Amino acid sequence: MPLDPDAVGATSGPRRSAWNRKDCILYALGVGAGPDELAFTTENTKGVEQQVLPTMPVVLSTDPGIFKRFGTFDWAKLVHAEQGVEVVRPLPPEGAVLTTTRIADMFDKGKAALVVTESESVDENSAELLFRTRTALFIGGAGGWGGDRGPSTSWSAPDRRPDHTVSYETRPDQALLYRLSGDRNPLHSDPAFARRAGFERPILHGLCTYGFTGRALLHALAGGDSAGMRTMDARFASPVLPGDVLHVDIWRTGEDQAYFQTRKDDGTVVLTNGVCTLNG
């Protein structure tokens, strides 16, 4: 059968995810952190307490079991459309969470569908809420049941120069580093697989671009303190190739809020509809 609209509200989990100091460092290196960010890339620097990047929950949260509740669809036509994260309190460098994921919405786009999942992750021992994530998945060929098309967005980049532009050059082997945090999709490592998918070579994980962008926001808006960022939401707009330079444009829109987008050297926007909120 096709996608099941009645599955909205279905849940999966709780699923246990654990991490240690090495995992946090691998994630930080995978999203481009380096020797000028030792709080994220080392665990034993004198006078520096190890921190965890606030985007790391995206590799710890979603329970893959939720996909079984969608109904049937062609996995080759599934595209990561949007990602959000809310860090309720900074992650410790070592810990474990129990994550429950639910299908929050399912929208009929005609020839395609948009499925939205939301996850909550609580500390395994204290049951304290640590973070939430929101994921939107675009599935080609899965629409047409006559359902709600979903809300339209009112986001637009402010009509002025960005308050900050942070530029990072990704490494030629960036995807090979990032995949060590868990996403082993061969689209990001196998040249033959990437060509079959229509790309000249393996592309960068969308969530890696998301992590690069999160670092830019963290340093530009929160002084590099992981406790300063509360939420980060964005829409994936275009693929990135390892080695591309990323430019993150940031506009302050309030005391505790900013809009952002990420673009490549040629002006192609790769992340859009960006909203970041800070802890006051």
Image: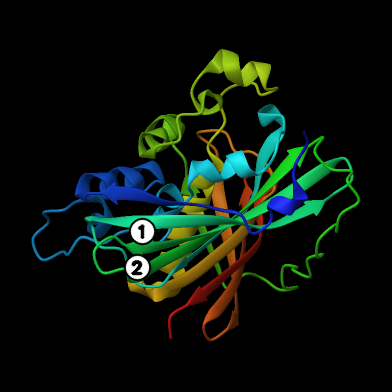
What is the crowding at mark 1: few (fewer than 14 residues within 10 Å), some, or many (at least 20)? Answer: many
From this view, report whether residue 254 is shown above or below residue 209.
below
Left or right, residue 191 beside residue 59: right
What is the crowding at mark 2: few (fewer than 14 residues within 10 Å), some, or many (at least 20)? Answer: many
Residue shown at 36% from the left, 58% from the top: 53
Q: Which residue is label 2 attached to? A: 226
Left or right, residue 112 beside residue 246: right
Residue shown at 56% from the left, 78% from the top: 257
Identify residue type, mark 2: Ser
The picture quadrant where one finds residue 227 is: bottom left
From this view, report whether residue 49 is shown above or below residue 67.
below
Q: Find the distance from the CA under tag 2 to the CA under tag 1.
A: 6 Å
Q: Which residue is label 1 attached to? A: 53
Give the quadrant of the N terminus: top right
Residue shown at 44% from the left, 52% from the top: 61
Left or right, residue 154 beside residue 64: right
From this view, report whether residue 162 is shown above or below residue 239.
below
Residue shown at 52% from the left, 82% from the top: 256
Residues under numbered marks 2 and 1 in contact, where contact means CB atoms less than 8 Å apart: yes
Give the quadrant of the C terminus: bottom left
Q: Which mark is residue 178?
A: none
Left or right, residue 2 beside residue 144: left
Residue 36 seen: no
Toward the viewer: 4 or 88?
4
Identify residue type, mark 1: Leu
